[in-house]
Amino acid sequence: MNRRSGSGRKKCLGAVVFFVAVLSLVCGSIAAAPDASQSLDVPNIKAGLWKEGKAVFSDVPIFDVFLQYARGYRPQQPVKFSHKTHVEVNKMECQYCHSGVHKSSFATVPSLELCMGCHNTVRPELPDIQALKKSYEVKEPISWEPVNHLPEHVVFNHERHVKGGVGCQNCHGQVQLMDQVEMVSSLKMGFCVSCHREYGASLDCAVCHY
């Protein structure tokens, strides 16, 4: 009975492993298939992502359905802001607004004073600029919605990564081409660990976790 029972469990486990492997391959093929509805002129905002934004080879978006914040997350912001207009069209430097990215653990967001330094005269007639000006006049900061989320027990330092040669696009994709910022990497543990392992960065737990 014990031999038969053990043999049955092995067969059952083998079947489960086979099913998961097949499902991963099928889902991977679906995720990798080109979207016929998209024009060839649409920019590839996922270009340059480390490991295509995956934690492991089978980490496909279909499995993110159970996550609160997952790839494709694009929250509506209180004021519309297009990185494409500011960076790609008007050639603004990323660090002009995200001044802390090379000297702080946080990239930081621009102050209202910085925004209004331009928009007092640049397109002041636009509704979103008027909303920006109103917040500036009453001294009430804009409550921007975070896009890229990490668990509270995870520590990430922008300064150390930028000074280490990690580009913004490695984790965030082609942000400069986005009219509305979205989360394009899984930002799961495997995504970070594979990069650390590849480049010889520390794999000590305390480096990234409290």
Image (cartoon, rainbow, N blue to C red):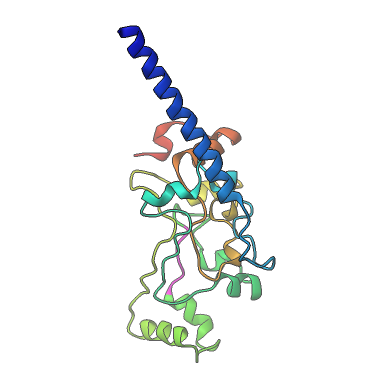
Label count reads 0
Q: Residue at x 41, y 23 (%)?
A: 13
Q: Is the C terminus in the top left, top right, bottom left or bottom right quadrant?
A: top left
Q: Residue at x 66, y 68 (%)?
A: 39
Q: Residue at x 37, y 74 (%)?
A: 142
Residue 87 relative to residue 204: left or right: right
Measured from the top left, where is residue 33 in percent x and y? 61, 52
Q: In the rendered structure, which segment of residues is drawn in magenta?
A: 107-111
Residue 78 relative to residue 39: left or right: left
Closer to the camera, 90 or 186? 186
Measured from the top left, where is residue 177 in percent x and y? 61, 66
Q: Is residue 45 above or below residue 31?
A: below
Residue 75, quarter of picture:
bottom left
Q: Is the N terminus in the top left, top right, bottom left or bottom right quadrant?
A: top left
Instruction: Give yes or no for residue 140 being in the magenta stretch.
Output: no
Residue 141 seen in the figure: yes
